[in-house]
Image (cartoon, rainbow, N blue to C red):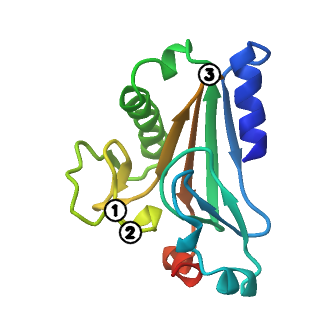
Amino acid sequence: MAVDEAILESAGRGDSLPTLRLYAWEPACLSLGYAQPVSDVDMERLHARGWDLVRRPTGGRAVLHVDELTYSVSGPLGELRLAGTVLESYNRLAAALTEALRLLGLPVQVQEHVKPTGRTTNPVCFELPSTYESTGGGKKLVGSAQARGREGVLQHGSLPLTGDLGRVLQALV
């Protein structure tokens, strides 16, 4: 996450181009959105599994980074693909991610205008899709969150590849 913040600062200064970064985690790591309380985490169980903990500068809920691909998009506020409101740029990035998944042969669509279900306290990212997220068969396929600052725009996302998404519950209260 620190690398993503450094890339964002560099792009914001005009020292680098907007950047798409793809990466995986070793060891496994639980990440929390910037506003998610650490009290959602059972630290004893987290450490017993050998998992690390990190806070994302972007929002969203808990993601267990294992058996998945993480992406980040960083760029200055003036970058056309990141311009507009958070929802507008989020929508453009979601459309690009969805098209990439379609090109890989996955039956995927963009979830439009999700209505809140009243379950706003759920600490797990992949439990429910949000507006403009990629879904397949009614399930969330890519979890994403965006942050904006003076430096520019940073969006993180996670695409689970294999494994049990429910494992994240092993470290949450």
The residue labelled by disc 1 is 128
Q: Nearer the viewer, residue 164 or 153?
A: 153
The residue labelled by disc 3 is 150
Q: Amino acid at mark 3?
A: Arg
Q: Earlier in the sequence, mark 3 or mark 2?
A: 2
Please indicate, yes or no, whether residue 104 appears anywhere in the rendered image.
Answer: no
| Image-based side of 97 in relation to 115, left or right | right
Point 78% across, 33% down: residue: 6
Neighbour tally class for label 3: few under 14, some 14-19, many 20 plus, Cα within 10 Å: few
Q: Quadrant of residue 123?
A: bottom left
Looking at the picture, how far across and down is residue 90, in whole percent?
43, 34
Please indicate, yes or no, whether residue 160 appears anywhere in the rendered image.
Answer: yes
Please tell me whether mark 1 sits on a helix, a strand or a loop: loop
Q: Amino acid at mark 1?
A: Leu
The reply to whether callout 1 and callout 3 are in contact (CB within 8 Å) is: no
Please tell me whether mark 2 sits on a helix, a strand or a loop: loop
Q: Earlier in the sequence, mark 1 or mark 3?
A: 1
Residue 122's tag is 2
Point 43% across, 64% down: residue: 126
